[in-house]
Image (spheres, grey):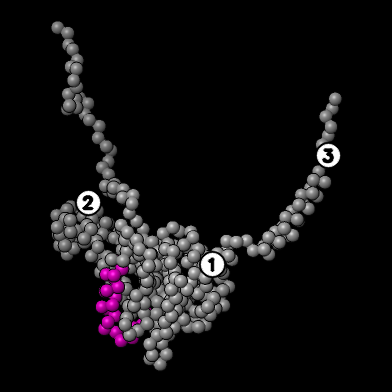
Amino acid sequence: MSFQRPLVQPDHPSPLRPAPRPLRRPSERVPPPPFWDTIRNPVTVCIAAYSRAANAIVTVSDALLSSEWEAYDGVLKIDPLHLKASWYALYAGWPEEYEAVRHHIKVILASLETPQLDDVLAAATAAYAKEICTAGDVQHLTPLGVTRAKFLEDGLRYFGDVEFARILKRLSKVRLGASLLVIGFDNDGGHIAEVTASGRAFRRSNNPPFYAIGSGAFAARALLNTDPEFWARQSQVEPMVYKLCAAKFAAQATVRTVGEKTMAMLFSQPVDGRRRALTYLQDFQLRGLRDIWFEQTVACPPAAIEHIKAKILDSARAVQLLQQNALPAPESPKP
């Protein structure tokens, strides 16, 4: 009796040849790709600079408000943090998270009559810490049915050391989708400080005295850093308004997620207890500046064309002719 191989192979593997298994189990699940029609990163640009000569702060931003599913161009990107003192915040990122952070900052500063810069930055750091904890709980602990206190107390026993460490790592990576520029005046003059999405607040020693946040920040900084002598001179307000508007126009031309409209505000320190001096420049007032910037930047100046013709191309042609005359004549081919 001859043995015949079955036509249908069995579903279970052979006991003599075990099924191959992966060498290691992946530690993290690969996240699914986001929807193609959603906005992943915050869109905007906010720029602020301090004029020590005029003791004034100039801010320029676009007016584009974006969420995960929609965008609207026509929103003022600056809000007060303290009703009596001159402290404001410009924001870039998700408006929902920014509003929650601003609410906590206003609650903390409400008990202070004249908050100083350190008070405002401490309030901003505390507000970010609270919102980051809330976001981490909602994203990683609420689906598991535990609170943060319960997780820290009994999580190691419930989930085991591997899963417990994995959840802790996820909680440590939580960031908000909003960053701030804090501007205002105290007893030491005008100040500008930046608060990142992780809640870290920092400020420079006004050298250079400008800050930029948002998706167009790198383009704005690139243009502002091209003229360090301008910032060393501590210029007046008028040229600083043009410089910041030019940086916003450059960011708009470079980054497609920067809005078309331009808003500018000028702040000066209160004198003798009076209210702050504030000037608001709307988009229709700044359109002429954009036309001037476009003509000066995009169009080639006639003086530059004459310089290229007279001192660059003519000298290059002269050098080329000299080199051609200096070369030996080619030998005639032998018969």
Q: Are marks 3 and 1 in contact (CB under 8 Å)?
A: no
Specify the quadrant that holds the C terminus. top right
Q: Are marks 2 and 1 in contact (CB under 8 Å)?
A: no
Within the image, what quadrant is residue 177 found in?
Answer: bottom left
In the rendered structure, find residue 106 and report the number of the disc placed on it: none
Q: Which residue is mark 3?
A: 329
Check disc 1 and give the amino acid type. Answer: Asp
In the rendered structure, find residue 291 and report the number of the disc placed on it: 1
Number of dots carrying numbers: 3
User: Residues in magenta?
Assistant: 97-118
Check disc 3 and give the amino acid type. Answer: Ala
- Along the viewing direction, whichever of 98 and 141 lies nearer the viewer: 98
Of circles 2 and 1, which is in front? 1
Q: Position of residue 7 (x, y in %)?
A: 19, 17
Left of 23 or right of it: where is 151? left
**First in sequence: mark 2 vs mark 3:** 2
Of circles 2 and 3, which is in front? 3
Residue occupying the point 45% across, 59% down:
255
Residue 48 visible (yes or no): no
Left of 54 or right of it: where is 66? left
Q: Is residue 98 magenta?
A: yes
Residue occupying the point 48% across, 83% down:
55
Residue occupying the point 50% across, 63% down:
250
Q: Is residue 105 magenta?
A: yes
Left of 299 or right of it: where is 34? left
- Along the viewing direction, whichever of 33 and 119 lies nearer the viewer: 33
Check disc 2 and give the amino acid type. Answer: Val
Q: Position of residue 184 (x, y in %)?
A: 39, 80
Q: Which residue is mark 2?
A: 162
**Label 2, label 1: how many angstroms apart (C-alpha)?**
60 Å
Callout 3 crowding tier (Cα within 10 Å): few <14, some 14–19, many ≥20 = few
